[in-house]
Image (cartoon, helix red, strand yellow):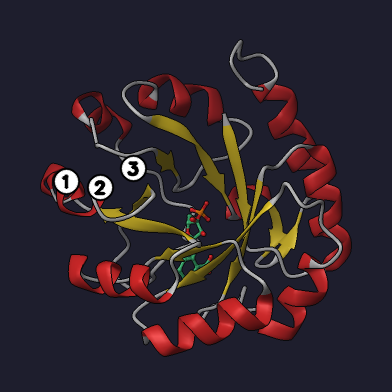
């Protein structure tokens, strides 16, 4: 199972979280977020990570030019689109960044949001389901109603996000497991404060995940 820990801002925490077992680290490139990190800082962290750890930049409602510039400056292996990006936008981004993983986040308000996955699933590499919040784009600590996931069968791999913690992770995975489910993404559920990760909670998370037969 793929485990992505998002909202990394500090070098020592990034290295420690990769050592604990995260396959992907996320860096918030949305300037309004309290977890924002500059391309220079991302690059400093990324240079110290093992090569097999995915380096994902999180963007929302920005220009393709900005994403391309930050991806190059930060040496990202993937980009996560967390705003209202259209399917056509994803197509254009793919043309500009052919070798980069594109993750489209859907902020799930109602079951109808899940129906929009079909249009993205044939264009991006990975989908990510996060909870909807009226004022915030992400990192809200709110969970999706996992009951909605029983019918979710997208045509590409997908990650579950939104308010996941070491305490609820096994129940969340139990609800999500099914067609093309590929892993989980956590941010505020393993933090002391926005952008400051709690390594004890991250270790607790991996201890919980080790109870799953297919974790590695
Ligand atoms: O974390 C942020 O500040 C953020 C800002 C803008 C877009 C996305 C953001 N975070 C993403 O939100 C999800 C879920 O976070 P949480 O576990 O509920 O705290 C995660 O994918 C973050 O990458």
Query: Which residue is at a point 72% across and 74% down the rendered structure image?
Result: 42
Instruction: Count neighbours of disc 1 (C-alpha within 10 A) and say few if under 14, some if 14 to 19, many if 20 or more.
Output: few
Does dot 1 land on a helix, a strand or a loop?
Answer: helix
* Cα–Cα gap, marks 3 and 1: 19 Å
Say whether marks 1 and 2 touch (CB < 8 Å). yes
Residue 131, x across and y down, in percent: 35, 52
Vertical arrangement, residue 25 with respect to residue 149, above or below: below
* Cα–Cα gap, marks 1 and 2: 5 Å
Is 187 on the left-hand or right-hand side of 172? right
Name the disc covering residue 118, or none: 1
Does dot 2 land on a helix, a strand or a loop?
Answer: helix
> Splitting the image into 4 quarters, where does residue 74 fall?
bottom right
Name the disc covering residue 121, or none: 2
Q: Is residue 209 visible?
A: yes
Name the disc covering residue 144, or none: 3
Query: Which residue is at a point 65% across and 24% down the rendered structure image?
Result: 209
Residue 38, x across and y down, in percent: 67, 84
State which tag comes first along the sequence, 3 or 1.
Answer: 1
Q: Nearer the viewer, residue 51 or 173?
A: 51
* Cα–Cα gap, marks 3 and 2: 19 Å
Is 42 on the left-hand or right-hand side of 185? right
């Amino acid at each position: 199972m793929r485990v992505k820990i998002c909202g990394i801002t500090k070098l020592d925490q990034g290295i420690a979280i990769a050592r604990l077992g995260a396959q992907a680290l996320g860096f918030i490139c949305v300037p309004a977020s309290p977890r924002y990190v500059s391309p220079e800082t991302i690059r400093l962290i990324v240079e110290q990570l093992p090569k097999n750890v995915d380096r994902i930049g999180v963007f929302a409602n920005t220009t393709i030019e900005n994403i391309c510039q930050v991806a190059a400056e930060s040496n990202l292996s993937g980009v996560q689109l967390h705003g209202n990006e259209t399917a056509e936008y994803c197509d254009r981004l793919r043309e500009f960044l052919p070798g980069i993983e594109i993750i489209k986040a859907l902020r799930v308000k109602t079951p109808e949001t899940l129906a929009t996955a079909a249009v993205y699933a044939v264009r991006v590499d990975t989908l990510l389901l996060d909870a909807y919040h009226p004022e915030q784009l992400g990192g809200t600590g709110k969970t999706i109603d996992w009951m909605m996931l029983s019918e979710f069968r997208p045509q590409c791999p997908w990650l579950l996000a939104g308010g996941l913690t070491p305490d609820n992770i096994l129940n969340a995975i139990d609800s999500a497991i099914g067609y093309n489910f590929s892993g989980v993404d956590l941010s505020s559920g393993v933090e002391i404060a926005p952008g400051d990760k709690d390594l004890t909670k991250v270790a607790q998370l991996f201890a919980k995940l080790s109870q799953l037969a297919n974790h590695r």
